[in-house]
Image (spheres, rainbow, N blue to C red):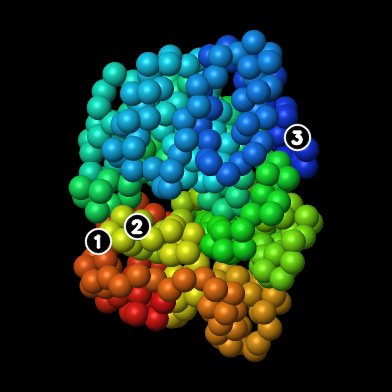
């Protein structure tokens, strides 16, 4: 068996009603706390009050949409002026990415672009990030368990990563209560992203026995839970999707992703479309393309056939019809279509994405363009 590494947050806490455990952890790291939050998470107000009541000084920064370079630079100036000793991020994946980026960059004395991949120099962080607690309020990106933050660079029309293994949160605190009542459209898009992020690491050419074990349990769990949430609020299904999302973060941080995310980063950077919705629309066409490419290359189809078996169990249909039914369900559930784009240009650019390195089989630009046409 080949050797492997496995990186994870310093501590993972999962369970309903456990969000308040962030307070003693943060106070153990310092008394000047930077709170990065979204606008709709009521628990953030309680967290700020509890920290202040315990003697901490709290500075709040609000994330607005997916972080981009100008917004990050403005937030970074504010954060450095406050001089925090620790950071807590509570919100969706975009907010947690912003919190991770700020925790990483406050101690640095270099421009942000020096540390960004692809469009920047990709230099390592000169100093360790500030301690970070991440509390997700959506079940989607798994950002609470990853070592990177995705940043939009409008001038380049790209989304790229700020990446360092030390960016893994010191505490990943996943309380599914924070996801209860999440709007249906957000639940659908983020939930499909979570499912993609356990399927792609399972199929990845960099998969390990440990990521396999995590994903094999999470894929059928997510495929069963998300349809339940499309029909009614269901705390047990919320719990399941929170576990799937956390698992996806752990898996992708250690096994990589694939063509869905390779394309999604380019599409998101060019159009500003929501990441989860892009991934959800791409999943079925990419599965078809990977299956056909594996057949054509004489590759082992066992893994992708297991994924198709799990999809059949959730959506029914013999053989390849299960993918049709899954795709039909995604569309009928209201996921928005992909925005208009220059497919050939997107496909060519996606070939250079770091996510594409994990795809189980190489896909040509022509194949990726066909995926975009089908999606």
265 or 178: nearer the viewer: 178
Q: Residue 186: which disc?
A: none
Viewer-nearest of labels 1 and 3?
3
Mark 1 and mark 2: span between their CA atoms? 16 Å
Label 2: few (<14), some (14–19) or many (≥20) C-alpha neighbours in 10 Å:
some
State the SS at label 2.
loop
State the SS at label 1.
helix
Q: Which residue is disc 2 drawn over?
A: 272
Sequence-wise, the earlier of marks 3 and 2 is 3
Q: Which residue is disc 3 drawn over?
A: 18
Can residue 197 be seen by looking at this rendering?
A: yes
Q: Is residue 80 above or below residue 191?
A: above
Residue 123 picture location, percent across and down: 28, 31
Residue 58 picture location, percent across and down: 55, 19
Residue 4 picture location, percent across and down: 53, 43
State the SS at label 3.
loop
Q: Is residue 197 above or below residue 367?
A: above
Sequence-wise, the earlier of marks 1 and 3 is 3
**Residue under the point 47% across and 64% down:** 277
Do residues under tags 1 and 3 come within 8 Å of each other at their CB atoms? no
**Residue under the point 31% across and 31% down:** 73
Do residues under tags 1 and 2 come within 8 Å of each other at their CB atoms? no
Q: Which residue is disc 1 drawn over?
A: 349
**Residue under the point 45% across and 39% down:** 63
Q: Is residue 216 left or right of residue 67?
A: right
Mark 3 and mark 2: span between their CA atoms? 34 Å
Q: Is residue 34 left or right of residue 375?
A: right
Residue 373 picture location, percent across and down: 34, 80
Viewer-nearest of labels 1 and 2?
2
Q: Is residue 348 left or right of residue 6?
A: left
């Amino acid at each position: 068996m080949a050797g492997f590494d496995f990186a994870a947050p310093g501590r993972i806490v999962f369970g309903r009603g456990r969000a308040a455990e962030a307070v003693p952890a943060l106070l153990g790291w310092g008394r000047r706390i930077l709170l990065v939050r979204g606008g709709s998470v009521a628990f953030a107000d309680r967290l700020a009050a509890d920290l202040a009541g315990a003697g901490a000084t709290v500075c709040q920064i609000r994330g607005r949409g997916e972080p981009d370079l100008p917004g990050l630079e403005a937030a970074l100036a504010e954060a450095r002026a406050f001089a925090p000793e620790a950071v807590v991020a509570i919100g969706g994946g975009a907010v947690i990415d912003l919190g991770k980026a700020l925790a990483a960059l406050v101690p640095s004395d270099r421009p942000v672009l020096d540390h960004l991949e692809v469009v920047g120099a990709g230099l390592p962080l000169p100093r360790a990030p500030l301690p970070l607690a991440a509390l997700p309020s959506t079940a989607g990106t798994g950002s609470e368990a990853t070592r990177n933050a995705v940043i939009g660079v409008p001038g380049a029309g790209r989304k790229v990563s700020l990446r360092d293994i030390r960016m893994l949160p010191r505490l990943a605190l996943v309380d599914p209560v924070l996801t209860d009542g999440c709007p249906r459209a957000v639940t659908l898009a983020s939930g499909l992203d979570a499912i993609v992020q356990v399927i792609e690491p399972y199929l990845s050419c960099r998969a390990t026995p440990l990521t396999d074990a995590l994903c094999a349990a999470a894929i059928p769990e997510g495929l069963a839970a998300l349809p339940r949430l499309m029909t009614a609020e269901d705390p047990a299904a919320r719990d399941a999707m929170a576990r799937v999302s956390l698992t996806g973060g752990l898996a992708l941080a250690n096994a990589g992703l694939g063509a869905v995310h390779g394309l999604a980063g380019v599409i998101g950077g060019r159009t500003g479309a929501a990441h989860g919705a892009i991934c959800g629309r791409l999943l079925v066409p990419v599965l078809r393309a990977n299956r056909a490419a594996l057949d054509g290359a004489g590759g082992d189809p066992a893994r992708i056939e297991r994924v198709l078996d799990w999809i059949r169990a959730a959506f029914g249909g013999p053989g390849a019809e299960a993918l049709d039914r899954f795709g039909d369900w995604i569309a009928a559930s209201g996921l928005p279509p992909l925005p208009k784009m220059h497919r050939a240009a997107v496909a060519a650019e996606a070939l250079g994405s770091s996510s594409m390195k994990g795809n189980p089989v190489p896909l040509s630009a022509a194949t990726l363009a066909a995926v975009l046409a089908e999606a």
